[in-house]
Amino acid sequence: MGRGGRGIAGPPARPRWLLFGFMGSAITVTAFRRGERWAWWALLVGNTVALVSAITYDKMVHAIGPFELTEYLGLALVWGALAVTGPLRAAGRPDPAAG
């Protein structure tokens, strides 16, 4: 039912958020550094899912304050960083993943 029988679920378990962080870090220092395209997409989707779910939870329980607003900043920073490092190829450069 939730905390106090009010039907409001508690915050997500910490191990799930740690798992997102560890997996994102592992992808970043391995495949993303090597320039593998799937790693860029995995970081985009994984970070978006993690941050949007946190934002959605905060809105559901009406917990919007300065700390919760950092989630929006984090999402903007992730999208900005990934936009700069996007898997785009310049004309005439072969794609190493194409074989």
Image (cartoon, rainbow, N blue to C red):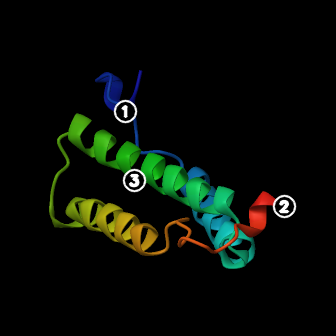
Quadrant position of residue 43? bottom right
Viewer-side label of 1, 2: 2
Going by the numbered disc 3, the residue's amino acid type is Leu
Viewer-side label of 3, 1: 3
Residue receiving disc 1: 3
Quadrant position of residue 40? bottom right
Q: Alpha-carbon neighbours of circle 3 within 10 Å: few (<14), some, or many (≥20)?
A: some
Residue receiving disc 2: 99
Viewer-side label of 3, 2: 2
Q: Secondary structure at mark 2?
A: loop
Label 3–label 1 contact, CB within 8 A: no
State whether residue 71 is above or below residue 59. below
Q: Secondary structure at mark 1?
A: helix
- Can you tell which mark lies on residue 51? 3
Between 45 and 92, the one lying in front of the other is 92
Q: Residue at x 40, y 28 (%)?
A: 2
Q: Earlier in the sequence, mark 3 or mark 2?
A: 3
Going by the numbered disc 1, the residue's amino acid type is Arg
Going by the numbered disc 2, the residue's amino acid type is Gly
Relative image position of residue 25 (x, y in whole percent): 63, 71
- Can you tell which mark lies on residue 42? none
Label 3–label 2 contact, CB within 8 A: no
